Amino acid sequence: MTKAFASQADLADRKITFEQLSPHCWAYTAEGDPNSGVIVGERFVMVSDATATPAMARDLIARIRTVSDKPIKYVLLTHYHAVRVLGASAYFAEGASEIVASQGTYELIGERGKEDMQSEMERFPRLFRNAETVPGLTWPTLVIGGGDPTRGEKPGRLTVDLGGVKVQVWSPGWGHTRGDTIAWVEEEKVLFSGDLVEYNAGVYTGDAHLEEWPATLEALRALGAQALVPGRGEAMQGAAAVNQALDYTKRWVETLFRCGKEAAASNMDLKAAMAHTRKAMDPVFGNVFIYEHCLPFDVSRAYDEARGVKNPRIWTAERDKEMWAALQE
């Protein structure tokens, strides 16, 4: 029987949790759906990842209003994927004046944002139920300059004072995309990683730089976080739990890329590469949320990168379905 495309069969709502991790930091999680983070200061609020639609963002805003009435001035886009950014317009009525992103993310929106929006809306119908509320692409208003780590260039950094709490924002390295950006509350040791880190969920790597990703994870580990809001999965509390999530993501990325390189070295076609990768991935990750959704896109990217395609090819709705059909048994 042919598997339903991506997450088109995943229509059940998830239980949302809004939990406090430190004096100023909260996690908004939903059983493997995309997470958001919230940092509440005495003057302003920052949201890390805007949600998929303005309608969905309003639920997060309502929860923020149970703990603060301050303006939600800053919205951080940890990367460009539609499911993370298209809800941003809902925050304008709540005081948002700065949509923050890295230079890499800004460039990726221009390069492939339109295609990604259409692609993700077809992959995730449940998350885009209210797609008519999306006014269009989300563009940053405050761009953090970023260097190319492959050339040894240092990324720019931004420190935001929310009143009583300072948030450091920068790109620690390439991984999930080439524009990944984190929020780090050093005084409280809370890290908002975006999709650079996941836990007990599929690690989507369709637009990734797999070779660089493990080093980026080690850069995050060196921060010594005591709490973590990953891109997907439960909020992690305590150093051991944070390291567990980092290890989980690193194992996924390294296993996937190793299998991609083995497939390329053996001149396998993509379907054979998929079967080869499953032998290593299924026993370890096969039961986690959105595993079957992620794996075809992940294998396609690992196979490309192993064959020297450094810049990920743009996913379109048409390419998505062609790839999916080609990999079905």
Image (spheres, rainbow, N blue to C red):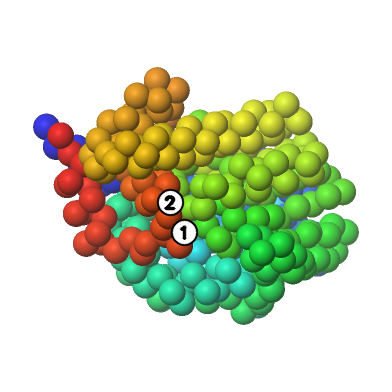
In this picture, is 102 found above or below 249?
below
Residue pointed to by mark 1: 310
Question: Which numbered disc flags the more N-terminal residue, 1 or 2?
Answer: 2
* Residue beneath the point at 72% across and 66% down: 153
Q: Is residue 2 left or right of residue 60?
A: left
* Residue beneath the point at 73% across and 26% down: 240
- Crowdedness near tag 2: few (<14), some (14–19) or many (≥20) residues, C-alpha within 10 Å: many
Residue pointed to by mark 2: 305
Measured as percent of width and height from the top left, residue 12 is found at 33, 39
Measured as percent of width and height from the top left, residue 95 is found at 65, 74
Task: Quadrant for residue 162, please give it.
Answer: bottom right
In this picture, is 218 found above or below 160?
above
- Crowdedness near tag 1: few (<14), some (14–19) or many (≥20) residues, C-alpha within 10 Å: some
Asked whether residue 291 appears in the rendered view, the answer is: no
> What is the quadrant of the N terminus in the image?
top left
Residue closer to the observer: 49 or 257: 257
Q: How many marks?
A: 2
> What is the quadrant of the C terminus in the image?
top left
Measured as percent of width and height from the top left, residue 259 is found at 41, 34
Residue closer to the observer: 149 or 130: 149
Asked whether the beta carbons under mark 1 and mark 2 sit within 8 Å of each other, the answer is yes
Q: Amino acid at mark 2?
A: Glu
Measured as percent of width and height from the top left, residue 139 is found at 52, 76
Q: Secondary structure at mark 1?
A: loop
